[in-house]
Amino acid sequence: MLNSRFTVTQVIAALSAVIATLLFFLPPGDLDVQTARVTSLTLFLIVFWATNTLPPFMPVLVFFAVAMIFKVVPPAVAFSGFSSGAIWMVFGGLVIGSAVTQTGLAKRIADIILSRFGGSYRRLIAGVIMLGVLLSFVIPSAIGRVVMLVPIAVALADHYQFASDAKGRYGIILAMVFATHTPSFGVITANVPNQLFVGTVESVWGEIIAYGTYWILHFPVLGFLKAILIFVLINVMFKDDLPQAIETNSASTQAMSGDAKRLSVIMIVVLLLWGTDFIHGIAPAWVALGAATVLLLPNIGILAAKSFNQHVNYATLIFIAGVISLGAVIAESGLVDMMTSLVEQWLPLAEGQPALNFIVLTLTSTVTSVVGTVPTVPALLTPLADSLSNLSGLPLMSVLMTQVVGFSTVFFPYQAPPLLVGAQLGNVNMGQAIRFTMVLGMTTLIILLPLNLVWWMILGYL
């Protein structure tokens, strides 16, 4: 019997740490040292992120230290997350999110939502989800949307005086986070994994995926139906009565402060630049960084240096850098070749069985995202597409597109940085976040995967 002082997750984490240590220092004979050590570090990170035994940034620090001390990979690879545009997108988003809260703009937008959807908890969740989905067509970054919208969700929960651990508060915040992130896999420009997928397909196979083709194939199920599923599950798992709202003057009827007006102008410019990146060619990350710089300028910006130091979550930045770096480390190691061999040998693919092949390929993408996080899936599976096409008899593009169906289904927040960032910004208990993520993932496989299969057959992709 386990000592009552230790939880099951703590025991799992401890055993995994022992296994990872043995693998690191005593690699099996059929593995070279680097592959064994990268596998060890990957196992360590994934288990500790999944069990939440330590704060998410702590395993990342261990990862960086071990990788450097034992020269597992070059520093440029190990710390590649810090040079990625995504980390600066997160940084800019955190600054913007802090400004949205401190200027009262979040409260003002929350009041507008309340005026349209505040009649009941169910209507409120519907309004939150609609806002999150609609903005995925405009803002090409899930993290950017999350850091903008979570303060609004928090303001909505505060308006109804939900306690910090109330189901209703968790429901409002998680509805905003998941509606902002998960249905966006149906819009080609809406998040980093989609953009990585499209770019990798073009660089490896020379195939250019059109916006409309992608949208008609993925959005009806991965976008629209997934949003409905989120609405249903939030109302089942976090249904709560709306407490009495705070009786205050609505922010929407009060004059905006000077800071709020300036922030509104900055946000309009940011949204325009994000929505037209295909014209000017400036990546969304650098737009976010530029906006953060303007917000922090002395005598011009909105946030003071003291406020910046208090409200920017550096632990979140370290975690995001670790997730990105892990993908680069895996891609640089022999782990990719090992996975390729296993995939080709063990996947039950056969010509003339399109439904089975679709399910197997989709689940392969899903499992890969659990092992290496969502952003790493295109890098790991795209080079295998030709072999998988030959084994299954499916067209190359159909094989490639199954990746999206697979990596859009997540089971743990660590797989998708926007989910973890959103939960942390909203102060959501990680156990509640993991619980909802797992239920949504399993329900997606049971309900939406068969519907996706039928939809693809109707469109002639299978």
Image: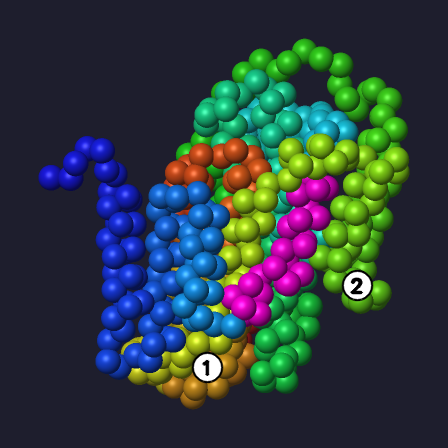
- Residue at 76% across, 46% down: 292
* Relative height, residue 79 to residue 159 (above, below): below
Residue span colored magenta: 75-97
Q: Which residue is mark 2?
A: 282
Q: Which x, y percent locates residue 161? A: 57, 18
Residue 405 in sight here = no
- Residue at 63% across, 27% down: 156
How far apart are labels 1 and 2 at the CA level? 31 Å
Is the residue marked by circle 2 packed among few (<14), some (14-19), or many (20+) residues within 10 Å?
few
- Determine the main secondary structure of the stretch shown in magenta: helix
Q: Which residue is mark 1?
A: 384
Question: Mark 1 belongs to which amino acid?
Answer: Leu
Residue 203 location, quadrant: bottom right
Specify the farthest residue to the front.
69
* Relative height, residue 385 to residue 148 (above, below): below
User: Any mark on residue 96, and which?
Assistant: none
Element type where label 1 sits in the image: helix
- Nearer-the-camera pick, 40 or 174: 40
Q: Earlier in the sequence, mark 1 or mark 2?
A: 2
* Relative height, residue 26 to residue 92 (above, below): below
Q: How was this image coloured?
A: rainbow
